Image (cartoon, rainbow, N blue to C red):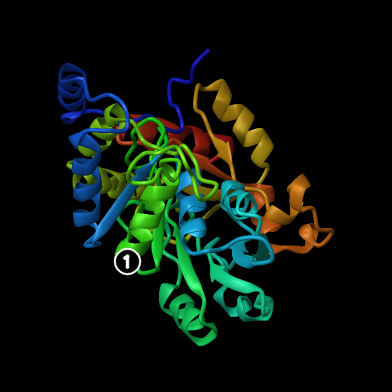
Amino acid sequence: MPFKYPVSRPALDGRELEYVTATVSDGWISSQGPMIQRFERAFADYNSVAHGVACSSGTAALTLALRALGIGPGDEVIVPEFTMVASAWAVTYTGATPVFVDCADDLNIDVTRIEEKITPRTKAIMPVHIYGRRCDMDAIMDIAFQYNLRVVEDSAEAHGIRPVGDIACFSLFANKIITSGEGGICLTDDPRLAGQMEHLRAMAFTKDHSFLHKKVAYNNRMTAMQAAVALGQVERLDEILEIRRAIEKRYDEGLADVPGITLMPPRDVLWMYDLRAERRGELQEFLASESIETRLFFKPMSRQPMYLDPVWPSLKANVFAEDGLYLPTHTGLTAADQDFVISKVRAFYGVG
């Protein structure tokens, strides 16, 4: 039975249907046609970046970015412990090795611990803007400069945070701030990198389409129908972010005095409203009984079976993973919906 108050729900209240209908009517439904370029240009312009390269998912975006930077077997990439596993998988897909750095109190990568993980094989740093909190990019870019490293920003949860690294990668999955259902996009100011990502996403065809492929590539293309949805979303991104800021403020005010709840630091853009909760499992069950969906925090990368490292229980990332969860966070939430969710959290902890 679906939750009355789901964690996420896409906001398709703009011109998405109009654009999809036009795409179908024109017959441009695959990865060709003007809608792809319109979306790429719109999102790049929004972020004041020269080039956008749309693709099939956020994971694909990260993989394309790393491949375009020449990262492969024998190389290492610095990745946060606290992230969704796709960040690490993208590194593994290239044949390189992810090297994990624990998180700080804001859940983002602890920049004070990056340098100790750098070796002669390190080629890049992959900061992840967790739940919409901007990493300390000034410090990260300084480290990258000192060690001649590239920076790939995992911005899957951070639409609205302007990129500063070599390539920024966004997810457009249905639960993200803006969506195309499934999809992703890479942003860069470097025309060579953009061209290489375009080449890699489309099977590395030669210009004469001769079916001789000089490198292993991918079919990571976005369809024009997905791009049509994404374009409608980009047009409303400022509005969506403003609604989400109001959601964050209402949760902050309603939960600030609840014993057993620890509020997390403010977010630059709100993807999910995250908090720490005593008796988390019981709270989650209670909220589910009231038709309120919640989700747990990410688990440390070093706890994942394919990257298992016995240090994981001692990590700060694991401390957060043990008691963190997030509440319904989407633009369809009304003030009354939020008040209901807040009232149930307060009731669980015995606060009127």
Residue at 29% in and 50% down: 245
Pick the residue in front: 139 or 327.
139
Q: Position of residue 41 (x, y in %)?
A: 20, 49
| Residue 337 is at least partly visible in this image | yes
Q: Position of residue 275 (x, y in %)?
A: 53, 50
Pick the residue in front: 296 or 141.
141
On screen, residue 49 above or below 40: below
Residue at 73% in and 48% down: 304
Q: Quadrant of residue 332?
A: top left
The reply, left or right, for residue 35 in relation to residue 328 is: left
Which residue type carries mark 1? Asp
| Crowd rating for badge 1 (residues with CA inside 10 Å; few <14, some 14–19, many 20+) | few
Q: Position of residue 261 (x, y in %)?
A: 56, 50
Residue at 27% in and 57% down: 51
Q: Secondary structure at mark 1?
A: loop
Q: Position of residue 300 (x, y in %)?
A: 68, 54
Q: Residue furthest right?
A: 310
Residue annotated with mark 1: 190
| Residue 257 is at least partly visible in this image | no
